[in-house]
Image (cartoon, helix red, strand yellow):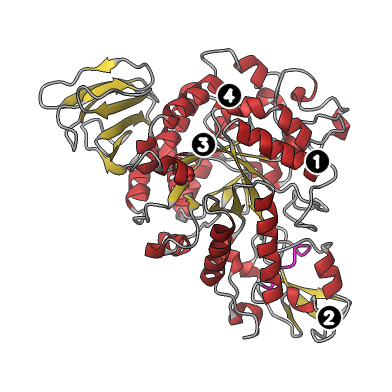
């Protein structure tokens, strides 16, 4: 790795922060967060250490699926602001050293999109250029309930359009018809959309629902509508690279390792730059439920080797349900029993509608350990807004909306999110013990023992450790049992060693520091103290219950900056 690589391939050492404009900060007091409000809070993100801001959909939308039902790819929802304010925001972010990526939602549109409205006016494609923008079939598709994304809301991926008497394809909600990515005019529009936002300064895209971009003849009922998602992704990547060589695509690909590797582009690395590591995320929850690190080790060792330009995004929470679909039925039940035993906490029979701190019983040691673990895993860490202060969920909200409540800035009215009447808020603030009177930025901002200070500290350490984003992983053997994970990441004569205790009981770990660096100098990366290595190259590490230790290894005499 050269120092210039850290700029050219910036995503490999980024700190990603995901947020929804409408629930972050309301500057005009109408109850809905807006771009002006986000701009006013950009220095908060810079102080936190964020280097990549991921904006969830802010496009014009009927808002029946929290903005993922897009009805105009080239605009800003008028509730949130306008294109001028968007450009100002991007400029502000760039001035603070923060890249900006936006959601690219191209599997489907809203049924209120002008394209879909036009497609329903005439079913003969020769007379209606928009008819083939979507996937239609004249015959009854039969039972497709096993293919729906939201089994509690839909029972088919096809919906009869009364106006034309034909069925249209929709993998998600009925009000979100799937685009026909086999149609050149649709592909042209998608590329035009990508080019538009790149021209406004965007640094890349988080691509929504990547596996659903594919279409087979069996699925659509016709050989006319067949889409190879990999061919499409290569086309998209090629266009992106031509328009802006430093732009990045982060894919939502919740699939097995073999398919994930294919969506990276394999050895060619010509599809996704990054993907969320859903498998390791789910393994982390199973490991924490058992207080046994072996699921994490198995997940990490099961990762395929990636091209040097590609990267995993590590995370513990996002804006969707906490999916546990890659666990076995018995493993999933273990996690349910530990972290979401009540039916109201579960969703879709596969996940939890909870945030991390309530799942861990509010134990500050365990919460701090969990985030330290996430930041230490090889890859690029991604935070969901509010995680840095330990926000909880609103279990009375429907489905995934439980974790999409407004940001909690202060203990005052509406958590400082808005001056509007509570009844006017886009969504109510979290009630109860995780409400803003107990959990907020203002209270934690200058408290050195707060979760916010801990996350800021972890980010500061992580940003000075390119080994975590670039290094070669080694899981270290030790004698402290399965409650402790010890691993190191090596690159170019330096290394980071991390030790985490997933158990409640204190433990002493003897860790070997033998490796590519002969007689290394060790520094505690959290306290900056020099660590003494015992005879035989062994580092003794004493850990409290849920304790952590980060150490930097470098050759003797090499200056460490910072």
Element at badge 4?
helix
**Residue 504 screen position, x and y as percent:** 39, 25
* Nearer-N-terminus badge (2/3): 3
Residue 66 in the figure: left or right of residue 198:
right
Residue drawn at (46%, 22%), measured in percent from left and top? 365
Give me the C-alpha separation between circle 2 and circle 3: 46 Å
Say above or below: 63 vs 149. above
Residue position for label 4: 47
**Residue 76 screen position, x and y as percent:** 79, 48
- Which numbered dot is residue 15? 3
Residue position for label 2: 128
Give me the C-alpha separation between circle 2 and circle 1: 34 Å
Give me the C-alpha separation between circle 4 and circle 2: 52 Å
Q: 10 Å neighbourhood of mark 2: few (<14), some, or many (≥20)?
A: some
**Residue 208 screen position, x and y as percent:** 62, 56
Depth order, front residue of 185/396 = 185
* Nearer-N-terminus badge (1/3): 3
Q: 10 Å neighbourhood of mark 1: few (<14), some, or many (≥20)?
A: many
Say above or below: 36 vs 203. above
Residue 309 in the figure: left or right of residue 24:
left
* Residue 237 seen in the current view: yes
Residues marked 1 and 3 touching at CB (< 8 Å)? no
| Furthest-left residue in this view | 536
Residue 489 in the figure: left or right of residue 374:
left
Residue drawn at (73%, 61%), measured in percent from left and top? 173
**Residue 234 screen position, x and y as percent:** 52, 67
| Furthest-top residue in this view | 447
Magenta segment: 174-180
Q: 10 Å neighbourhood of mark 3: few (<14), some, or many (≥20)?
A: many
- Which numbered dot is residue 80? 1
Q: Check if residue 177 falls in the magenta segment.
A: yes
Element at badge 1?
loop
């Amino acid at each position: 790795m050269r120092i210039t690589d850290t700029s050219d391939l910036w995503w490999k050492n980024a700190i990603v922060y995901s947020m929804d404009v409408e629930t972050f900060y309301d500057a005009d007091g109408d109850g809905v967060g807006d771009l002006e409000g986000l701009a006013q809070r950009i220095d908060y993100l810079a102080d936190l250490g964020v280097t990549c801001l991921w904006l969830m959909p802010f496009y014009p939308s009927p808002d029946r699926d929290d903005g993922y039902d897009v009805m105009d790819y080239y605009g800003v929802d008028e509730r949130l602001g306008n294109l001028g304010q968007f450009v100002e925001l991007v400029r502000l972010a760039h001035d603070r050293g923060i890249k900006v990526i936006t959601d690219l939602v191209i599997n489907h549109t809203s049924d209120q999109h002008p394209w879909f409205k036009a497609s329903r006016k005439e079913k003969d494609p020769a007379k209606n250029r928009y008819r083939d923008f979507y996937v239609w079939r004249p015959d009854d598709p039969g039972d497709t309930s096993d293919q729906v994304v939201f089994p509690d809301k839909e029972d088919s991926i096809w919906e009869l359009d009364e106006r034309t008497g034909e069925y249209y394809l929709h993998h998600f909600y009925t009000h979100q018809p799937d685009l026909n990515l086999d149609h050149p005019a649709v592909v042209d529009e998608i590329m035009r959309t990508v080019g538009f936002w790149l021209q406004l300064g965007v640094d890349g895209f988080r691509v929504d629902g990547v596996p659903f971009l594919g279409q087979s003849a069996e699925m659509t009922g016709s050989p006319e509508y067949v889409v190879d998602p990999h061919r499409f992704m290569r086309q998209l990547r090629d266009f992106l690279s031509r328009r802006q060589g430093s732009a990045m695509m982060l894919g939502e690909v919740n699939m097995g390792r073999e398919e994930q590797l294919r969506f990276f582009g394999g050895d060619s690395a010509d599809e996704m730059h990054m993907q969320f590591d859903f498998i390791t995320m789910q393994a982390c929850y199973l490991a924490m439920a058992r207080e046994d690190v072996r699921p994490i080790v198995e997940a990490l060792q099961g990762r395929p080797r990636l091209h040097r330009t590609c990267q995993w995004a590590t995370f513990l929470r996002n804006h969707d349900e906490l999916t546990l679909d890659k666990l076995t039925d018995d493993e999933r039940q273990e996690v349910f029993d530990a972290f979401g035993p009540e039916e109201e906490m579960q969703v879709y029979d596969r996940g939890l509608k909870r945030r991390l701190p309530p799942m861990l019983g509010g134990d500050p040691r365990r919460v701090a350990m969990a985030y330290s673990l996430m930041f230490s895993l090889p890859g690029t860490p991604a935070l969901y807004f509010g995680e840095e202060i330990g926000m909880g969920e609103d279990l009375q909200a429907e489905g995934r909306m439980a974790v999409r409540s407004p940001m909690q800035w202060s203990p005052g009215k509406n958590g400082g999110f808005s001056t509007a009447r509570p009844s006017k808020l886009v969504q109510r603030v979290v009630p109860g013990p995780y409400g803003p009177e107990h959990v907020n930025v203002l209270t934690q901002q200058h408290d050195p023992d707060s979760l916010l200070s801990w996350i800021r500290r972890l980010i500061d350490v992580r940003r000075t450790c390119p080994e975590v984003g670039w290094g070669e992983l080694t899981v270290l053997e030790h004698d402290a049992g399965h409650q402790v994970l010890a691993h190191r990441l090596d690159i170019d004569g330096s290394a980071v060693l991390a030790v985490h205790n997933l158990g409640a009981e204190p433990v002493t770990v003897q860790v070997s520091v033998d490796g590519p660096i002969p007689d290394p100098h060790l520094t505690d990366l959290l306290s900056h103290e020099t660590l003494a290595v015992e005879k035989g190259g062994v580092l003794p590490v004493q850990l409290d219950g849920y304790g952590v230790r980060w150490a930097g290894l470098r050759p003797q005499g090499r200056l460490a900056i910072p």
